[in-house]
Image (cartoon, rainbow, N blue to C red):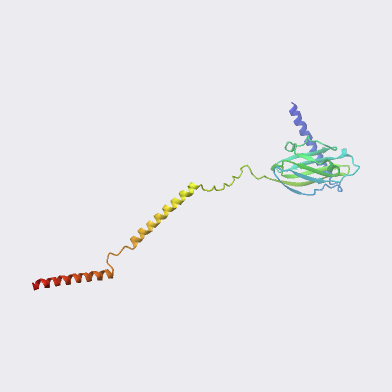
């Protein structure tokens, strides 16, 4: 029962805020001298960071603090959310929507000087949109708007693996590599010899000098044999 009553009360407060906001926006046409300015009409921020949005409005040094009314809301394509409200000079956090709870802080000193500075922390991509603030005091009423774009943060969930530097070879491996290189060199030499023997075989014929010596030897043998035969005939 208490939850139902709280929900109805919160809904009623939001409806009242919207009605008052509509009244302020309508009265802006009549109060042409009262202008709510935005020093920056567009903001860029990254998700999970914070940003300060600012509006300025006319005020009087002797104006009553209880005559200050401020209504700020976020307008997107899907919904409208209240993020900040001042009623009779006092902040009303109950009318703040749940998604902005604990994330919006205002500068009280700047507010007395006619500067509305709202710091939005722990930004989300859903915070992107049009921010409208309506202000009313003894001097008049008006509204100003600015746009905020929140970019998604880079995904750093997967850490990069460190590059492994190559380890120096041990002495045993160096000796093994040297022996294998030596064996490979010997095998290459033997292979080259086999190729040369196959391509350039040794000649079986004698060279010219050896042939001449052989012929001379044969002639000498025949001459001696002939002389021996002559000697036999004489006997």
Residue 195: % across, % down: 36, 59
Looking at the rendered image, the quarter that the N terminus falls into is top right
**Residue nearest the observer in this picture, 175 or 61:** 175
Looking at the rendered image, the quarter that the C terminus falls into is bottom left
Farthest-out residue, front:
235
Task: Residue 26: name its quadrant.
Answer: top right
Residue 205: % across, % down: 27, 66
Q: On screen, 118 above or below 186?
A: above
- Count up the numbered dots: 0
Farthest-out residue, top:
1
Residue 196: % across, % down: 36, 61
Q: Residue at x 78, y 46 (%)?
A: 145
Please indicate whether residue 155 sits to the left or right of residue 116 in the image.
left
**Residue nearest the observer in this picture, 131 or 177:** 177
Q: On screen, 160 above or below 201?
A: above
**Residue nearest the observer in this picture, 157 or 64:** 157
Task: Residue 125: name its quadrant.
Answer: top right
Farthest-out residue, left:
235
**Residue nearest the observer in this picture, 119 or 136:** 119
Please indicate whether residue 28 sits to the left or right of residue 48 in the image.
right
Residue 25: % across, % down: 81, 44
Q: Residue at x 38, y 59 (%)?
A: 192
């Amino acid at each position: 029962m208490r939850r139902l009553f709280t929900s109805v009360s919160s809904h009623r407060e939001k409806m009242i805020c919207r009605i008052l906001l509509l009244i302020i926006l309508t009265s802006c046409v009549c109060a042409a001298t009262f202008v709510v300015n935005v020093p920056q009409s567009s903001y860029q921020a990254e998700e999970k960071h914070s940003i300060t949005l600012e509006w300025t409005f006319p005020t009087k040094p002797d104006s009553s603090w209880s005559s200050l009314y401020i209504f700020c809301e976020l307008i997107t394509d899907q919904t409208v959310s209240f993020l900040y409200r001042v009623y009779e000079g006092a902040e009303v956090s109950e009318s703040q929507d749940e998604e902005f709870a604990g994330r919006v802080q205002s500068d009280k000193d700047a507010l007395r000087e006619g500067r509305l500075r709202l710091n939005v922390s722990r930004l989300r991509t859903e915070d992107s949109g049009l921010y409208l603030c309506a202000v009313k005091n003894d001097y008049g009423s008006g509204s100003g708007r600015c746009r905020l774009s929140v970019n998604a943060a880079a995904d750093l969930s997967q850490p990069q693996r460190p590059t492994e530097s190559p380890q120096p070879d041990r002495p045993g491996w160096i000796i093994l590599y040297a022996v294998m290189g030596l064996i490979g060199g010997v095998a290459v030499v033997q292979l080259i010899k086999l190729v040369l023997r196959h391509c350039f075989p040794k000649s079986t014929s004698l060279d010219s000098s050896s042939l001449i010596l052989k012929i001379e030897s044969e002639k000498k043998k025949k001459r001696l044999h002939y002389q021996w035969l002559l000697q036999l005939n004489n006997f």
